[in-house]
Amino acid sequence: MDQNRLEPPALRMGVLGCSDIAWRRALPALAADPSVELVAVASREEGKARRFAERFGCEAVTGYRALVDRADVDGLYVPVPAALHEPWVEAALRAGKHVLCEKPLTVDASATRRLAALAAARGLVLLENFMFQFHAQHQAVRDLLEQGVIGELRGVRAVFTIPALHPDDIRYRPELGGGCLLDVGGYPVRTAQLFLGPDLRVAGAVAVRDPGSGVDVAGAALLVSTEGVSAQLTYGMSHGYRSAYELAGSEGRIVLDRAYTPPADHRPVLRVETKGGSEEITLPADDQWAELVRVFTEAARGARNLDRYSELTLRQAELVEGIQRAAGLR
């Protein structure tokens, strides 16, 4: 190693909110990355912030604004409820912070466009956290497609369903951006974009509402590309667990289970079926949360361009709105 070569300074990160996903996944990934310095975690509840800070060896801050305004923070991870993303992401961007925001970036396509424009104008990174797209297994699927293993792509099926949640879960609260489409439904929508491109239209959608809360707890959508290739999407939070997609081609199909939330030590298995038979391809394990942090930090340092992901985010918001309208949710 060149002793005269200086390593870039660590990206100083703050965490705006003490959510379950922050505790279980995001903070461990941030704390484990040597290019990140975890500075502080903020909560509206002092005790909650202190509990998170003690575990991850950083400072506890009471109140979100106090963290946004700190000069010793370069970037913020924002895992507050979906309906609160817009004001706090905007505050962070206006304070000169790079932002990694939990999905969905906002609950409104016009707000997503506005925040994306603000980040671009200020030269800041704004990344919506669909962490699954950075797992190496999806590149392996793309490689098989490009090699023509299943011929021409004819259709996509994607499903992400989870069991019913605790009644107090924020995903049952419409005022906080609850509902399955904005949560688990986003993964199949993003999958359709990854394999069919962002130029999709909504051909139809249905939704089932929870009679108590009024949020959607089950849904399905049909998206169609300009070439007429369809994506059939299923999502819900009153189901058995399922996380998978299937690509149907003119000469076969590729099936991937555990597509969206594989553990870091999981070795994915691609099932490839053609007229020559069925084959299972076992891939190396990959940590999609570690990859997410790496992508974000590299972009914040100017070493990676995220224009493609920004385009996917903008189109995602428009597609979700189209699905909501088609399903009678808007």
Image (cartoon, rainbow, N blue to C red):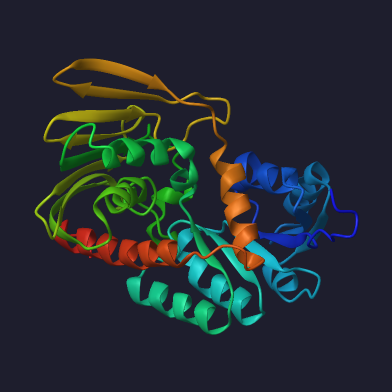
* Side of 55 where 121 appears, left or right: left
Residue farthest toward the bottom in the current orientation of the protein:
121
Identify which residue, 98 or 164, lies in the foreground. 98
Where does the image place residue 1, in percent across and percent down from the top left?
A: 84, 48
Identify which residue, 246 or 220, lies in the foreground. 246
* Side of 319 where 37 appears, left or right: right
Identify which residue, 165 or 103, lies in the foreground. 103
Mark count: 0
Please tell me which residue is depicted at 47% across the width and 38% down the height of the picture. 136
Residue 30, visible in the rendered structure: yes
Residue farthest toward the front in the current orientation of the protein:
2
Q: Is residue 280 above or below residue 4?
A: above
Residue 237, visible in the rendered structure: no
* Side of 47 where 176 appears, left or right: left
Q: Quadrant of the C terminus?
A: bottom left
Please tell me which residue is depicted at 31% across the width and 51% down the height of the picture. 181
Q: Is residue 180 above or below residue 85?
A: above
Please tell me which residue is depicted at 41% across the width and 63% down the height of the picture. 308
Residue 174 figure quarter: bottom left
Residue 20 figure quarter: top right
Where does the image place residue 16, in percent across and percent down from the top left?
A: 65, 61
Residue 254 figure quarter: top left
Identify which residue, 302 or 112, lies in the foreground. 302
Q: Is residue 149 above or below residue 320?
A: above
* Side of 108 where 225 appears, left or right: left
Where does the image place residue 85, in percent across and percent down from the top left?
A: 51, 66
Where does the image place residue 18, in percent across and percent down from the top left?
A: 65, 52
